[in-house]
Amino acid sequence: MRLKNIPGARDMVAESSLVIHEPEKTKGNWQEVFQNNHPIRIEIGMGKGKFIHEMAERNPDINYIGIEKYSSVLLRALQKMEAAPLPNLVFIRMDAEDIEKVFDREEVDRIYLNFSDPWPKDRHAKRRLTSGEFLKRYDRFLKRDGVVEFKTDNRDLFDFSLGELEGAGFEALQITYDLHQDGEMSQGNIMTEYEERFSNMGNPICKYIVKR
């Protein structure tokens, strides 16, 4: 489920100073972008940016990078930032398949995957952001003690994602099949736009936190 194409969105994103336009050149030097040595956390497929904007607002001593493929969606996040600027948040417009080209070894300490595209057809399984193929990509730049957090209302995708962990060398630290009823894992939870929508529909939210 994506926003309809917004005329001129690509040009507006290309002109924004909030977007890192040649992220490959920043690989290994993201601390210079933020001009500090704070931890770096990324959200892949951030949608309209509600989650990562609020995370950055709550945690000024952590740097955040929001990654989104679609200009029309990223534009909404940019508009949010223009209304409420934050020095510890920047954006990249890119396809997640190229993610390892923009981060160096142990450069990121946490990855957020929120309501990722389920790619329901079996032949597209490798495109899922929680597939073994993507977990191996994350392994190349995630810190040794870093974690991946994943939320979805799609139980089939969640079960698939759990099944991919062992083969990619990851293990679960925490798992819940009903986040909003889980007293421990729901503490400090920030809902995405989709999470609010699906929760209002009565769909339970699944979440895992995993590490190598």
Image (spheres, rainbow, N blue to C red):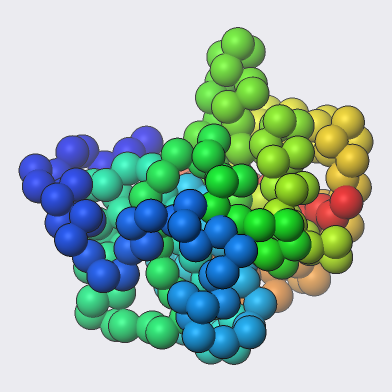
Q: Which image quadrant is residue 95 in?
A: top left
67 vs 82: above or below: above
Along the line of sight, the residue nearer the viewer: 60 or 200: 60
54 vs 27: above or below: below
x then y, percent, for residue 124: 57, 17
- Name of the residue lying farthest toward the top: 123
Q: How many marks?
A: 0
23 vs 169: above or below: below
168 vs 68: above or below: above
Residue in the picture at 21% in, 55% down: 14
- Quadrant (top left/top right/bottom left/bottom right) for the N terminus: top left
Q: Which image quadrant is residue 123 in?
A: top right
Residue in the picture at 27% in, 65% down: 78
x then y, percent, for residue 185: 76, 66
x then y, percent, for residue 86: 38, 83
Residue 197 in sight here: no
- Name of the residue lying farthest toward the front: 25
x then y, percent, for residue 168: 84, 36
Residue in the picture at 57% in, 77% down: 31
Residue in the picture at 30% in, 74% down: 81
Residue 6 in sight here: yes
Locate residue 11 relative to residue 69 in the image: left or right: left
Along the line of sight, the residue nearer the viewer: 206 or 204: 206
